[in-house]
Amino acid sequence: MARSLRTWRLSPRQFRTVCAVALALLCIIVVTGAAVRLTGSGLGCNDWPRCNDQQLVDVSTKHSAIEQINRLFTGLVSVSVIVAVLGSLIREPRRRDLTLLSLGLVAGMVGQIVLGGITVLVHLHPVAVQSHFLLSMVLVANAVVLVHRAGMPDGERVVRLTSPTVRLMRWCGAATAVAIAAGTVVTGAGPHAGDEKARRFHLAISTAARVHSAFVWLAVASVLALVWRLRTRAADRAVLDGPITAWMCVAVAQGAIGYVQYFSGVPAVLVAFHVAGATLLWAVTVWCYEARLAPAADSAV
């Protein structure tokens, strides 16, 4: 195998493309996983890794077919992650940081597979479903960092923002993370459990939604505070203008979807869009923080 790896080589641009594909698939599987729950197919396969105690693969019903498709897509994502690791080994030149980040994706996927099995075995307990989603967010963050750093020139990197701006960005990231985590509590209290017999949190969905909304507004306020600071920091603003603009656009769309779904009885289609929006918002949040880095030769700080 070592000889084969020496034979094949990837350019930095090709390796970044491999990583971008893995990131895209990791984001898509969050939505397909939500689709399994939203269609009531969470227990379409009631065993793991077999679909049931009679068959490894069973597509005899709509629910089992949907669950099987999601499991197969998980396999595709796993392949993309493995390709990213192999790509990091044959990238020319090889970089240790990219290899470690790629291995982080593998570790996360192993964790997802284990959690997926546990979620089925505990009959979609909301804590297990929460954990499954939150680990997906860790994987997405890892992949965003990998894609961003794979696109940077080899060599030393430095922070190109002032320290107060970086600290404020950390608060923005933390507030966004808490808001997304609070959203999983709404999911655990809501009507889309994945199966009609699945347990729910003993919490009124209206209460959970209000708490989630409060954290969302806290995240928005923290980003607005960052925007206010940037108005007098031209160098910092030049770095963060694109990422922050993207964050605000996604956040506004996500907020609109959230309020519409709440006041329209939480329809499954809007929940799917909300999950997709949360995933995109988190990816943009990580991108905002990663934007602080630059090759040492290009840094003005």
Image (cartoon, grey):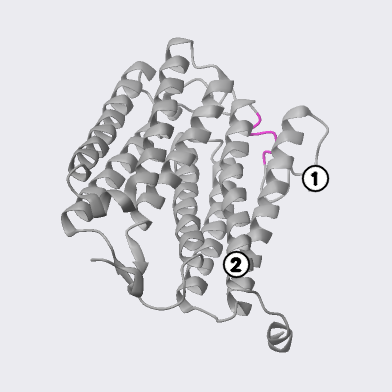
Quarter of the image for the C terminus: give it.
bottom left
Secondary structure under badge 1?
loop
Give the tally of numbered discs: 2
The residue depicted at 69 percent of the width and 33 percent of the height is: 44
Judged from the image, the secondary structure of the residue bearing numbered disc 2 is: helix
- The residue labelled by disc 2 is 13
Instruction: Give the quadrant of residue 184.
Output: top left
Vertical arrangement, residue 3 with respect to residue 273, above or below: below
Q: Disc 2, disc 1: CB below 8 Å?
A: no
The amino acid on which the numbered mark 2 sits, given as a three-letter code, is Arg
Amino acid carrying label 1: it is Val
Q: Quadrant of residue 77?
A: bottom right
Q: Quadrant of residue 10?
A: bottom right
Q: Main secondary structure of the magenta part?
A: loop
* Magenta stretch encompasses residue 44: yes
Q: Is residue 123 magenta?
A: no
Numbered circle sitting on residue 205: none
Q: Which residue is mark 1?
A: 57
Q: Position of residue 221 (x, y in %)?
A: 23, 33
- In the image, which residues are magenta? 41-46
Q: Would you say residue 283 is visible in this rendering? A: yes
